[in-house]
Image: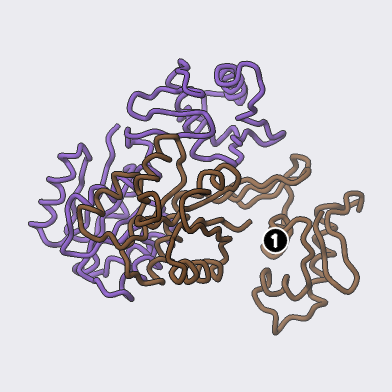
Amino acid sequence: MNKTIMIVEDEEDILDLMEYTLSKEGYDVITCIDTSNVKAMLDEEDISLILMDRNLPGTEGSDFIAKLREEGYNQPVIYVSAKNSSDEILEGFERGADDYITKPFNINELKARVKALIKRTQQEQNIIKYKDIIYNSSNKSFSIENKDIKLTHLEHDLLLEFLKNKNILLSREVLLERVWKDSLNKQLKTVNVAIKRLKETIDPDGSKNYIQAVRGEGYIFC
Amino acid sequence: MSVKIAIVEDEEDLLELIEYSLSKEDFETIGFLDTKNIVQLLEEEEIDLLIMDRNLPGVEGSEFVAQLREDGFLVPVIYLTAKDKESQIEEGFLRGGDDYITKPFNMKELILRIKAILKRTSKNLNDGVLAYRDLLLDKSSRTLSVDGIRVDITKLEYNLLYEFIINKNNILDRDYLLENVWKDTESYQYRTVNVAINRIKEKIDPDKTKEYIQTVRGVGYKMC
């Protein structure tokens, strides 16, 4: 699932630039030009990070965040602000910042700081459970009905890809690219063979039908 | 337990100044003039944060950090360096940094940036609050309030809730909990975990309407 980033910024050009850049990085982006809907969004959506301007119509951004913190909202915040004196930066950190970027900023650095902060605040799920399949990423093991199953490296990657994309149709091309990391030298038949073998391992009597073939399209895991 | 910070900086005067300033904030510091003993240190001690110069004798600081990351060390890193070009800053992050401060720097800002990282990553920083829905853990007094009302919990229950909140939405299995909360996987049984969780559920959700902690059959528990 994509991480969601909220941007609060009243200058539309900068807002567009940030939104464009971060969505290209694979994040879902929610934009606000002032703070009026921020709290409602935080209650409704699973927001991984807030990028917050400080000079905003109505409220000062860091005042707003300080109040959110008092109420227990704990989402990571990076200020992106023209307030660049060292006192203002210190004030930003005292008012609940995780990071502080001064304008004008380098968009690549912004990207890097966003990524670093999300990495340290959002732990990857280490256990994924789906129906009777359990995956534990700390030792990369799968079990079905509490019995460990032995998979080859490739089968492991393949099943994990399905587990992460349950109920989503995956074409053979996509699977070649993501699992085999090579869509040029391998043939689509490779996928068929591997999936057939995987099915025999995880569902020997064919009763559970985890992976269904969709004719002419690909496979779907459900 | 206090926060332990390792500092790698080859200019001795600066190293001393940083160590002095951080110790005044009640951080325990260990200073190094090069990277030689860092791996050994990380293997032997629980280090909460690494402050890393880049221009060092022998190894370049960010290359060293990239190697640490490859070897699986997850300790948070702040670069503190004279390399201040945009491309160098990007490089620092790509090589596994958590923050980047360019020299000359403001000591107060360094301290605030350290705290901002520790707030998210260290159990040893006893400062601030950790909130989840209407649960609020106060880290300095190690107390819990639910919907604004103080609820008495034991030390173990505090640690257990803490672990659930920082790992929210993530399934924690009983082995993980024994290791990280009880710090002992040998002499305890899974039943110990079950009993403790039932007890804490009764405390934080007596009429069982809020479902903070869910049981995931065959795996463990999760907070959601």
- The residue tagged 1 is A161
Above or below — where is A174 with respect to B6? below
Q: Quadrant of the N terminus of chain B?
A: top left
Q: Would you call the spot at circle 1 few (<14 residues within 10 Å), some (14-19), or many (20 or more)? A: some
Query: Which chain identifier belongs to the purple chain?
Result: B
Residue located 61% across and 26% down the image: B190
Residue located 60% across and 50% down the image: A137
Residue located 26% across and 46% down the image: B5
Residue located 59% across and 35% down the image: B223
Type of residue at label 1? Glu
Q: Chain of mark 1?
A: A
Question: Could you say which is closer to the camera, residue A132 or residue B98?
Answer: B98
Above or below — where is A185 with respect to A204? below
Question: Could you say which is closer to the camera, residue A134 or residue B135?
Answer: B135
Colour given to chain A in the rendered image: brown
Question: Could you say which is closer to the camera, residue A1 or residue B12?
Answer: A1
Residue B44: image x %, image y %? 33, 44
Above or below — where is A51 with respect to A45? below
**Among the 4 quarters of the image, the one containing residue B199:** top right
